Image: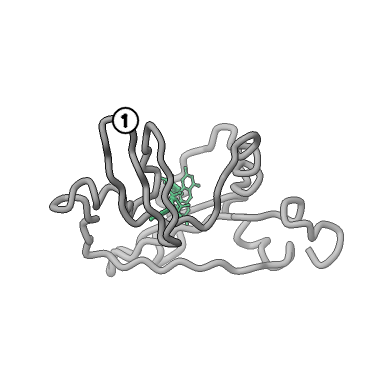
Amino acid sequence: MFLNLATAESLFHIPPSRRLRINREKLRKLLLDGIEVQWNKSLTKFSTSPSCVGVRFQDGSLVEGKLLIGADGANSKLRRLLCPETGASNQLPIRCLGGTIKLSPEAIKPLRSLDPLLFQGCHPDTSTNLWYSVLDTPEANGSKGEEE
Ligand SMILES: Cc1cc2nc3c(=O)[nH]c(=O)nc-3n(C[C@H](O)[C@H](O)[C@H](O)COP(=O)(O)OP(=O)(O)OC[C@H]3O[C@@H](n4cnc5c(N)ncnc54)[C@H](O)[C@@H]3O)c2cc1C
């Protein structure tokens, strides 16, 4: 649902097909199954030789292997090392503020009556955009049955 934020009226309402909201922590645990992860390693630089690639981490440790895959996100250090001229992110003239709030089932009712999962909107005068979505449930965060 897309709202006019000046009036809270619905501008567009695309009836949803079957939707699944995936709990990130559970998915992460599932994907980690059988993989040995070394946590709290922060890449600082890498070097290559004909036989291997060496990766240096902030704690001083060195890891050598055959293949280095950069999956370090939007501000990828590896991308910036590989492409010093073009690897930085481009700053957009947009300010974004994000926050989370915990609500009781009673308090969240008015929001869930708009949509059980998510909605968004834009203010016609300021172009302010709003995105709202439910991130957690009593079932997932363990509060079900008591102080949900
Ligand atoms: C609030 C929010 C809600 C979102 N909701 C959704 C959604 O509902 N559905 C959806 O599909 N997408 C959603 N996204 C987008 C999604 O999260 C990203 O597109 C996705 O996580 C990008 O994956 P990635 O692996 O490229 O990077 P990331 O998930 O950012 O992972 C990068 C990893 O690299 C690590 N790292 C960074 N620098 C270094 C370094 N120097 N050395 C070692 N490790 C490093 C970081 O710690 C991190 O663990 C959302 C994003 C945000 C911010």
For label 1, the residue is 51
Q: Quadrant of the C terminus?
A: bottom right
- Image position of 106 with respect to 144: above or below: below
Q: Residue 9, position in %: x, y?
A: 45, 58
At label 1, counting other C-alpha atoms closer than 10 Å, the crowd grade (few under 14, some 14-19, many 20 or more) is few
Instruction: Please state if 138 lies on the left or on the right of 41 as rendered.
Output: right
User: Residue extending furthest left?
Assistant: 85
Out of 44 and 28, give the one closest to the viewer.
Answer: 44
In the depicted view, which residue is nearer to us: 136 or 29? Answer: 29
Identify the residue shown where x is 40% and y is 51%.
Answer: 11
Residue 94 at least partly seen:
yes
Asked if residue 78 is positioned above or below residue 5 in the image, the reply reads above
Q: Quadrant of residue 96?
A: bottom left
Question: What kind of residue is marked 1?
Answer: Ser
Q: Secondary structure at mark 1?
A: loop
Residue at the (55%, 53%) spot, across then down: 39
